[in-house]
């Protein structure tokens, strides 16, 4: 009798689980619990240190290649990375090879530079979307201005103070690729390894395990993975943002999944052996 | 962007999100509308990106400025479209030839160096520095090297996997399982993050500033499902009575 009752658990309409998950994720948004994010992974710390050790005025190239489909994971980390770069008074160049990123980049730059009193053309420049990433990467190795003569507003970049002394990868201190695609692989293979430019990355949690080998060999200077990584970076720069606020919801959702896995396995064992 | 457009954007965003999530309950016309709209908008966006970011700056403007050399790669690109006309589809081979040559020339050396030689080097290099390493790092290096060998052996099929060789192969399977477990765990986390992102937006659009877009659309959807279920039940009852 009890066994039959327990077996009903496995026939539960999955829509109840969807509802439970929706409530679990929605409640912390409405009323944040403030669960702590105490662990900071070494890979995230390495990205932080790569930027932290750069002298003021160094040129850092940000390749922001994500669209709204991966925005919850990558937008907070891109924002945190740029905040860190501006707080260190680094010169920032932004490129993108995903057309859908352009709006998201504008969204960040409408807000973040003002927080640090940074000016377009002087402290940062946003270059326009370019198709055919490999051709662009190859061209930038010899002469950046051969492929990017103007910024996204059509202003010539060669005379901009932000681009002073920057002609190709040799003049860049770091390349940071935040992407929901395989573009970080390209930055490592076609730029980092080939021209000796330090490359760091920020990727979705799905892609994160695949970059372990690059981290081990130091081909990648550091890696931020998913919303958890974004929250870690926000902790490091001491500026909580969307990544940190998402940790409550993620923690609770993970607990729910663990509870469901454990419950179903305990029931399964009980049904099988008792 | 004006306030009105922000509010309209909020309603569209909240509406489309709820319409798409409604499929989790059951299929409905609102889901279909959102699905078709997504495909149409995606295609439209891709078309305008191709025209404004590729065709205009890379072909039209250079040609207008007298840089006629861009016509050659343009013709090679257009040649790919002949695939759709069987009689002259052979022309597309010229375009593909360039793409293959260019792609292979770039990818093969980079792939060999980055993913093959550097990775082999990275696995072996720690053994040349054992004296300066901590016991934990030595253990880590041995684990990486041992794992690499066992997994590679699992995929080596020219020797029958039995006896001790079977054990090496089995260890390789455990390493693979650990990787798949980590990858799956991260996938779950990534999906929850995306869901959190949508819910966070829905919460934003539930504010008075957006005239309670989320609540209004959600209630409207619930009312639709109740009415739909009521009328289909009535229809079913009538047809059963007629039968």
Image: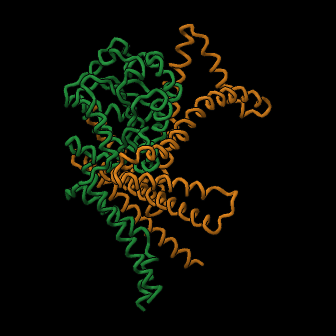
Name the spot of residue A223 as percent of width and height, x first. Answer: 37, 43
Q: Colour of chain B?
A: orange
Name the spot of residue A208 as percent of width and height, x first. Answer: 42, 48
Residue positioned 25% across, 44% down in the render: A234
- Quarter of the figure with residue A173: top left
Q: Quadrant of the N terminus of chain B?
A: top left
Residue positioned 36% across, 29% down in the render: A174
> Looking at the colours in the rendered structure, which chain would you say is drawn in green?
A
Name the spot of residue B181 as percent of width and height, x first. Answer: 45, 60
Spot the residue most to the bottom: A1
The answer to whether B43 is drawn above or below residue B22 in the figure is above
- Quarter of the figure with residue A54: top left
Residue positioned 32% across, 39% down in the render: A47
Residue positioned 45% across, 56% down in the render: B143
Task: Count how many numbered circles sit on residues in the image.
Answer: 0
**Would you say residue B48 is visible in this rendering?**
no
Left of B17 or right of it: where is B243?
Answer: right
Q: Quadrant of the C terminus of chain B?
A: bottom right
Left of B93 or right of it: where is A69?
Answer: left
Name the spot of residue A17 as percent of width and height, x first. Answer: 39, 68
- B202 vs A27, nearest the viewer: A27
**Would you say residue A100 is visible in this rendering?**
yes
The answer to whether A122 is drawn above or below residue B90 in the figure is above
- A192 vs B236, nearest the viewer: A192
The answer to whether B158 is drawn above or below residue A97 in the figure is below
- A106 vs A60, nearest the viewer: A60
């Amino acid at each position: 009798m009890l066994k039959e009752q327990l077996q009903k658990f496995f026939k539960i309409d999955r829509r109840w689980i969807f509802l439970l998950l929706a409530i679990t994720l929605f409640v912390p948004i409405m009323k944040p619990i403030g669960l702590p994010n105490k662990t900071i992974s070494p890979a995230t710390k390495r990205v932080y240190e790569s930027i932290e050790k750069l002298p003021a005025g160094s040129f850092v190239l940000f390749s922001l290649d994500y669209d709204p489909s991966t925005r919850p994971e990558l937008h907070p980390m891109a924002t945190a990375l740029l905040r860190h770069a501006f707080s260190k008074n680094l010169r920032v160049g932004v490129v993108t090879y995903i057309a859908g990123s352009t709006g998201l980049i504008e969204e960040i730059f409408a807000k973040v530079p003002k927080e640090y009193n940074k000016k377009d053309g002087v402290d940062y420049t946003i270059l326009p979307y370019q198709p055919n990433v490999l051709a662009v990467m190859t061209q930038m190795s010899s002469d950046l201005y051969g492929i990017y003569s103007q910024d996204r507003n059509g202003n010539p970049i060669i005379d901009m103070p932000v681009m002073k002394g920057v002609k190709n990868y040799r003049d860049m201190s770091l390349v940071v690729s935040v992407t929901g695609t395989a573009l970080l692989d390209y930055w490592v293979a076609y730029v980092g390894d080939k021209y000796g430019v330090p490359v760091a990355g920020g990727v979705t949690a799905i892609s994160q395990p695949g970059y372990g080998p690059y981290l081990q060999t130091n081909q990648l200077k550091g890696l931020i993975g998913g919303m958890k990584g974004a929250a870690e970076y926000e902790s490091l720069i001491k500026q909580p943002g969307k990544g940190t606020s998402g940790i409550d919801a993620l923690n609770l959702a993970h607990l729910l999944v663990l509870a469901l896995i454990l419950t179903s396995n305990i029931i399964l064992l009980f049904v099988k052996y008792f | 962007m004006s306030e009105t457009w922000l509010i309209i954007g909020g309603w569209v965003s909240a509406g489309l999100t709820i319409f798409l999530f409604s499929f989790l309950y059951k299929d409905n016309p609102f889901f279909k509308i959102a699905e078709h709209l997504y495909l149409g908008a995606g295609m439209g966006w891709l078309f305008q990106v191709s025209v404004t970011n590729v065709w205009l700056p890379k072909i039209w403007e250079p040609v207008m400025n007298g840089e006629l050399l861009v016509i050659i790669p343009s013709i090679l690109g257009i040649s790919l479209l002949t695939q759709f006309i069987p009689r002259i589809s052979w022309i597309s081979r010229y375009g593909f030839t360039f793409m293959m040559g260019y792609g292979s020339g770039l990818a093969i050396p980079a792939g060999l160096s980055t993913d093959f030689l550097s990775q082999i080097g990275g696995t072996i290099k720690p053994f040349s520095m054992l004296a300066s390493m901590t016991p934990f790092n030595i253990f880590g290096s041995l684990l990486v090297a041992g794992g690499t060998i066992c997994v590679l052996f699992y995929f080596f099929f020219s020797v029958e996997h039995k006896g001790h060789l079977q054990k090496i192969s089995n260890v390789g399977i455990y390493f693979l399982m650990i990787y798949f477990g980590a990858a799956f765990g991260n996938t779950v986390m990534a999906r929850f993050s995306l869901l959190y992102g949508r819910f966070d937006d829905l919460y934003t659009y539930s504010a008075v500033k957006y005239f309670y877009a989320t609540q209004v659309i959600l209630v409207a959807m619930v009312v639709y499902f109740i009415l739909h279920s009521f009328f289909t039940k009535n229809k079913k009852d009538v047809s059963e009575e007629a039968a």
